[in-house]
């Protein structure tokens, strides 16, 4: 088996020749795609937080535990790791207050549990960032890198599960109390009713 691998390696070296150009090509592709990925990610985050703001606009001001515009604080680097806990608890509690006020409470947690799991995974992802910066000093950095990657992916998936659950409750709030046709949006601080 070892002989086969050596032959395959030799054939690959002959076919590809000097592999340095492959490394350069990979670096060029990464540099070209990085801005595209960053713009796409930012657009996705803005859309997600716009959805959270829209749901809070549908909650009567007396039932809100946070203002709709405050969801944007989650996008502040480092501060967002902490603020995600406020989003994970206050939006579901605001929804609970609104549904109770409309006498439509279904007894659920309105996404609070999945929100707290998301916030915990996101905070752990942030906490692992600083040790990741010192990987050169850590033996076997691959394990820490894998944990960091898994926490990041888990927090992303959990955030979108939380978001879709909150958006579903927001759609229910858009309906008038006695039907499921459409209802009021309350203005936020800036007077925008979207």
Image: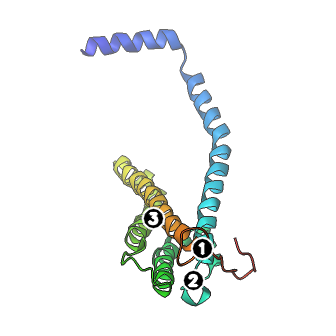
Q: Name the residue located 67 percent from the left edge and 50 percent from the top edge.
A: 39
Residue 148 position in % (x across, y down): 41, 55
Say left or right for 105 vs 56.
Answer: left
| Gap between marks 2 and 3 measured at Cα | 20 Å
User: Label 2: few (<14), some or many (≥20) within 10 Å?
Assistant: some
Residue 35's place in the image compared with 82, above or below, is above
The answer to the question of whether label 1 and label 3 lie on touching residues, with beta carbons closer than 8 A, is: no
Q: CA distance from mark 1 to mark 2?
A: 8 Å
Q: Position of residue 109 (x, y in %)?
A: 38, 75
- Asked whether the beta carbons under mark 1 and mark 2 sit within 8 Å of each other, the answer is yes
Image quadrant occupied by the C terminus: bottom right
- Disc 2, SS: loop
Q: Which residue is mark 3?
A: 122
Query: Residue at the location (45% across, 60% down)?
Result: 161
| Residue drawn at 50 percent across, 65 percent down | 168
Above-or-below relation of 90 to 72: below
Q: Which mark is residue 71?
A: 1
Marks 1 and 3, how far apart in space? 16 Å
Disc 3 is placed on an element classified as helix
Who is closer to the viewer here, 134 or 148? 148
Quarter of the view holding residue 26: top right
- Where 21 falls versus 81 (above or below)? above
Report the residue marked by disc 2: 66
């Amino acid at each position: 088996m070892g002989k086969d691998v050596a032959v395959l390696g030799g054939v690959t070296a002959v076919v590809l020749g000097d592999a340095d150009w492959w490394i350069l090509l990979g670096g060029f592709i990464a540099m070209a795609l990085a801005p595209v990925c960053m713009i796409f990610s930012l657009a996705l985050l803005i859309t997600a937080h716009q959805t959270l703001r829209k749901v809070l606009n549908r909650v009567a001001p007396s039932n809100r535990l946070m203002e709709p515009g405050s969801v944007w604080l989650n996008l502040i680097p480092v501060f967002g790791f902490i603020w995600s806990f406020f989003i994970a608890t206050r939006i579901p509690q605001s929804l609970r207050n609104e549904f109770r006020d409309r006498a439509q409470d279904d007894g659920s947690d309105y996404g609070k549990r999945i929100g707290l799991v998301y916030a915990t995974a996101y905070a752990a992802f942030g906490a692992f960032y600083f040790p990741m910066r010192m990987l050169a000093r850590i033996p076997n950095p691959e394990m820490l890198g894998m944990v960091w990657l898994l926490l990041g992916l888990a927090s992303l998936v959990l955030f979108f599960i939380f978001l879709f659950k909150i958006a579903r409750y927001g759609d229910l709030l858009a309906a008038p109390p006695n039907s499921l046709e459409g209802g009021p949006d309350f203005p936020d601080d800036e007077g925008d009713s979207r």
